[in-house]
Structures are given as structure tokens and as C-alpha cells.
Image: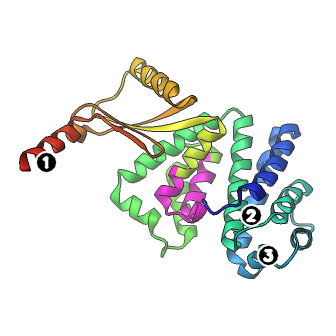
Amino acid sequence: MDNINRESYGAAADKLAAFAASADVQRIGPVAEEILSVADVLRRERRLRRALADPGRSGEDHAALLRSVLAGKASDEAVDILATQVTGRWSGPGALLDGVELLGVTALLTGVDRAGDLGDVEDELFRFGQVVSGDTRLAAALADTTTPLEARVQLIRDLLKGKAKPATLRLAELAAAGFGGRGFESSLTRLIELAAKQRDHSVAYVTTAVPLTEADEQRLAGRLAQLYGREVSLKIDVDPRIIGGVRVKVGSDLFDGTVSRRLAEAKTALAN
């Protein structure tokens, strides 16, 4: 999604934020679904996607086309937000699609945040990702784009039924669909990061050989918050293979204090 026009997306995001600030929390979810449905249409309808991103047509023409397509099919709120987005300039049809999809996810996360469930959804997505990555056959099944999407979505529904919030399930389905043009695993990671960002948090992926105590977690989160100047959401994976120590990854930053790393470095030094 790095190709998204930040200025064009920002205008629509501001429109969404203004709507969400004044809307009843129960209204935000349906509008989010409408925006995500439009993203699905744009993914299927290449000609429409191209027409809405055509640099040879004015933003007003784009908005008029969108309104004609969605007349009677979406709420006024969703149409107004999307019309603002297509009025902007986009580098191409793919960038527009990514922008609409991101806007829908942002709307969904905004509603979940307003309901007070965003921290739980973020953690549920991470735990589901751990379950998937820990099962080679399951990971392969969800990553296999030759399998119909409906089958992969049904597998996710079966796995999460009664175990996760509806928003967690919906976001996992979006990951299966390849959110932002990514594979399942990277889509899920991106969605976790967007959920954290919605709460103004960074995500720290922490690998330890043994479970951390609550005091250890609080101490580590505090140090990272001081380092990055914002709250940090810890996503902890226990992996005995690292033998000891801690590995922490925040964005592109990696802090590796594991015993396995030091042993690898010592082996390399001896070999040289």
C-alpha cells in the first residue's frame, strides 16, 4: 500500500473521521462494510477501477460516476466518503483500490475502537496468526490462492467460531483475500499493525525462550515506550529454540539478544 496517494487518501480519511466522531457507534460498522464491499467491486470490475482513476477525467467526473454506480446501493455516508476519495488524484487503478480497501479497514477499526474492543481484536488476530504459523498444513491451506476464496474463508470461520469477536473474524477474512495485495501472513501482520496504530500504539514482536512474567512484560513495554515515544503493544511468542535471551522487532528495528544468535556468531568467528 506504499503507492497510495497520501493527500487523496487523507481527505477521505478526514471525512471518515468526521463521520465517525458524530455517528452512533452502531452505525460505523455498516458503513465500513459498505466501503469494503465497494473495494470488492473495484477488485472485480477492472474497467470501473480504471475509469475512477483515469487522470484524463476530473475529480468531479470521478465522483459523479461513483455516485451513479452506487445510487440506491449504499448509504449517503459511505457514498460521500468514497466520493471524496475518488475526487483526488491517484497514481493508478491499483493505488485507488488499495486506498478504498484501507479506508474500509480504518472505518472498521474505528468502530471497534469506539466500542472498546480494539485491544482484544488486536490480540485475537495475533494469536490466530500464531496458530496458523504453528501448523504447516493450515498455513499452506490459507496461503494457497489456487483454492477458492470462499473455501479459505469458510476454514477461517470454522477455526474462529465462538473463539473470537466478529471484527477479528472479518479482518482475518480480509487477510485471506489478500489485503493490500499481500499474502495471508503478511496481510494479517499489516492488519495487526493498523489495529495498534488506531490506538496510537507501535507493535513489538517479542520472542523469548520462556514465558515472561507480568512484571517483565511491563518493564519491557515501558522501556520500548520510552525509546519510541509512544505506547507499545507486545506480541509475545515463546520459542525454546532461541535457548535464552530476548529478540524484539519493532518495524524495521531488530534487537536480538538471544543465546542462539550469540552462539551463531561465535561459531562463525571460530570458522573464520
Whole-percent x, y for residue 18 in the image: 86, 43
Mark number, residue 129: none
Mark toward the start of the polypeptide (2 vs 1): 2
Task: Judge from the rendering whether residue 218 lies leftward or rightward of residue 79; answer left or right.
Answer: left
Q: Where 236 falls versus 45 (above or below)?
A: above
The extreme bottom residue here reads 47
Q: Furthest residue to the top?
A: 215
Left or right placement of residue 211 versus residue 179 in this view: left
In the rendered structure, which disc, 2 or 3, sits on the residue that comes first in sequence?
Answer: 2
* Residue numbers of the magenta segment: 168-189
Q: Which residue is mark 2?
A: 37
* Circle 1: residue type: Thr
Q: As shown in the figure, which amino acid type bears the numbered disc 3? A: Pro
- Say left or right for 257 vs 84: left
Q: Is residue 193 above or below residue 101?
A: above
Q: Which residue is mark 1?
A: 268
Q: Residue at x 49, y 52 (%)?
A: 159
